[in-house]
Image (spheres, rainbow, N blue to C red):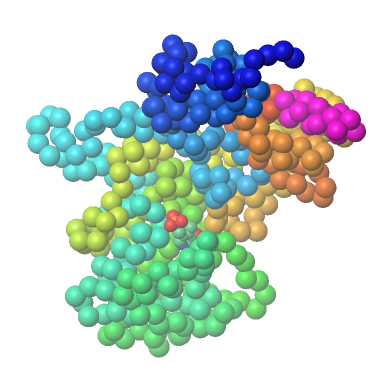
Amino acid sequence: MHREDPRRRTPRTDVVLADPLLAEPRARLGDAIVKQAVSRALERCRAGEVTPEDVPAAAHAALPAYAASLRRVVNATGVVVHTNLGRAPLSPAAVEALTVAAGATDVELDLATGRRGRRGRSAMAALAAAVPDAGGVHVVNNGAAALALVTCALAAGRSGRRDVVIARGELVEIGDGFRIPELLESVGARLREVGTTNRVRLADYEAAVDDDVAFVLKVHPSNFLVSGFTSSVGVRELATLPVPVVVDIGSGLLAPHPRLPDEPSASAVLRDGADLVTASGDKLLGGPQCGLLLGTAELVESLRRHPFARALRVDKLTLAALEATLTGPVPPVAAALAADPAALRARAETIAAAIGEVPGGVAEAVDSTAAVGGGGAPGVELPSAAVALPAPLAEALRLDDRLPVVGRVERGRLLLDLVAVDPADDAHLVEAVRRCATRCADRCADRPAG
Ligand SMILES: *Cc1c(COP(=O)(O)O)cnc(C)c1O
């Protein structure tokens, strides 16, 4: 090689930035992101990996697709509501609604009169229509916020009643170290635990309720199962107590689901006599992150007007996505829960055939067992199908730069479970596996030489 020292020919940053190739990305992504890509390309130029003429193209090739670094991934884990993958994926209708709402929008304006309108009225109307048993509805930032607001309004307010009665078997840790009993105490409630880990009776509640008790809280054990010598008290019995009954159903099912017989729904719990129900919007409802509050008109109105409610207020994007989830086509979570195992198996066969041979084996369609996940329906097994591949492909697929695919490794094989994969992504799945297989093959081929 008789090239001139590349360090001397390395262009200046401002010269590269002015290259016409980078004009459109600068407008779309902003200068800071483009500058970073240019700096990296210049480093590669100094190292002799890129010619000075190719620096703008190298910077352009390394640009991210969006200004944010959260990336779209394919959920092939077989866990329908995967917390680490952002829980519920939104329906196309919800995505469109929040894109429209991202600009100036009539979230709090009545266009007919030109005056202030009630914030999120159409989303609230959609929620009320979906749960006719609720006299009132309200939405806050997440399930934990819903519980915090109820507790603030009922147990930390001016009533002088600070105690919350809760069964010992329902002192739930939700995830990431957060615990419901600590959440209640953090906003000023005093817990009055009743029963034991495995059993509680109505008499335990009756003995605990006195003038200091603000409400009885029933929490759905949404992420664990207790079996054996157990008993708990149903909402219908709790409703005979002389204080409000609040039920945290967790997963946000609005009506009973045939495949999830043990998962409580807002409608059923209200019909059984609960005064208030709290739930998440981004679990089984399949909507955006939010906390649902449903209950008697009077209690819900007092929550809505509580000063703390302002600190938990949802934004316009959430309201838009929630309304579209409730009124629009079946969201992905509901579609996954209703998936026909034979149809999943047929997709797996097609995908496996299209992938064919990969380093270390051949793609194969297999039956699989999927889970609901995300703090819902623990123990429920969903019959599903998957494409089985050699386990070493798991990392390569996760690190794919175009479309990361997250599967699960089971008994030494990588399974790409299709229950939560949009059929529209099947072709992308095939392409991603092929890309990774090629890369893996190259690396394996390099190894003996290197
Ligand atoms: C998930 C869950 C919560 C917390 O809801 P977030 O929306 O995550 O804040 C509270 N209670 C139960 C029973 C849950 O399952």
> In what quadrant of the picture does the C terminus appear?
top right
Chief secondary structure of the magenta span?
A: helix
Residue range (magenta): 434-450
Q: In the rendered view, does 366 fall on the left or right side of 307? A: right
User: How many numbered marks appear?
Assistant: 0
Q: Position of residue 268 (x, y in %)?
A: 44, 57
Q: Position of residue 258 (x, y in %)?
A: 57, 49
Which one is nearer the viewer's eye here, 274 or 103? 103
Residue at the image position 42 percent from the left and 72 percent from the top: 182
Q: In the rendered view, does 379 fall on the left or right side of 206? A: right
Q: In the rendered view, does 351 fall on the left or right side of 227? A: right
Tell me: residue 164, above or below residue 328.
below
Q: Position of residue 91 (x, y in %)?
A: 47, 34
**Displayed quadrant of residue 438:** top right
> In what quadrant of the picture does the N terminus appear?
top right
Residue at the image position 26 percent from the left and 74 percent from the top: 156
Q: Position of residue 310 (x, y in %)?
A: 23, 55
Residue 89 visible in the shown view: yes
Residue 12 lies within the magenta run:
no
Point out the residue furthest to the right here.
448
